Amino acid sequence: MRAIIAESNIAVVPILPSIFDEMATLEFLKRLEAIKSVRKQKKRVMLVANRYRADRSASRRLEEFLVTEGLLLTARIPSARFIPTWRATAPPSSTVTTRPRSSSSKPGCRLCAPSKRPRPMAS
């Protein structure tokens, strides 16, 4: 691990909102802290929350856990079931919304979901 840190500028550490991952990440961060360049803040360590959903209790518990440990999240990546989509009237950089991923969407193309139009009623 020391060799990898020596070659890098930033260490990105993913963390899931789960008690098991919280404890494992804390142990991993202690090992990183033992490396002199990390301890002297010459190398940055960035925590990234994966499968993060603000409306879930596990995500709120993760936030509380990090606060009590004096740690900050650099980014929050939402659950894979929610993908970003952009409104057609605004540029992509200004407005982001989310929608559930359709189970019938094409494999390998997470942004391509078939439109669900109502079928005409028979008369």
Image: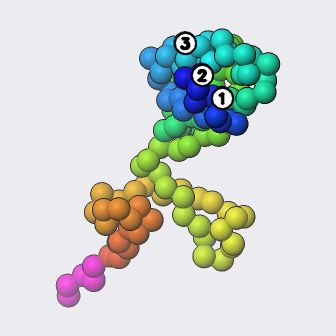
Q: Mark 2 = which residue?
A: 2
For the C terminus, the image quarter is bottom left
Q: How are the colours assigned in the image? A: rainbow
* Mark 2: few/some/many CA within 10 Å (<14, 14-19, 20+): some
* Amino acid identity at mark 3: Glu
Disc 3 vs disc 1: which is toward the camera?
A: 1
Secondary-structure class at tag 3:
helix
In this image, 58 relative to 93: left or right? Answer: left
Residue 57 appears in view? no
Secondary-structure class at tag 1:
helix
Disc 2 vs disc 3: which is toward the camera?
A: 2
Residue visible at 73% across and 22% down? 37
User: Is 121 placed above or below 101 here?
Assistant: below
Span highlighted in magenta in the image: 119-123
Residue visible at 65% across and 40% down? 75
Disc 2 and disc 1 in contact, CB within 8 angstroms: yes
Decide which of tag 2 and tag 3 comes sooner along the chain.
2
Q: Mark 3 = which residue?
A: 27
Report x, y in % for residue 65. Answer: 62, 17
**Which of these two is toward me, 57 or 62?**
62
In this image, 17 relative to 67: left or right? Answer: left
User: Is 109 placed above or below 58 here?
Assistant: below
Per the rendering, the mark at residue 6 is: 1
Q: State which quadrant residue 105 falls in.
A: bottom left
* Mark 3: few/some/many CA within 10 Å (<14, 14-19, 20+): few
In this image, 19 relative to 40: left or right? Answer: left
Report x, y in % for residue 13. Answer: 58, 30
Q: CA distance from mark 3 to mark 1?
A: 20 Å
Report x, y in % for residue 60. Answer: 59, 27
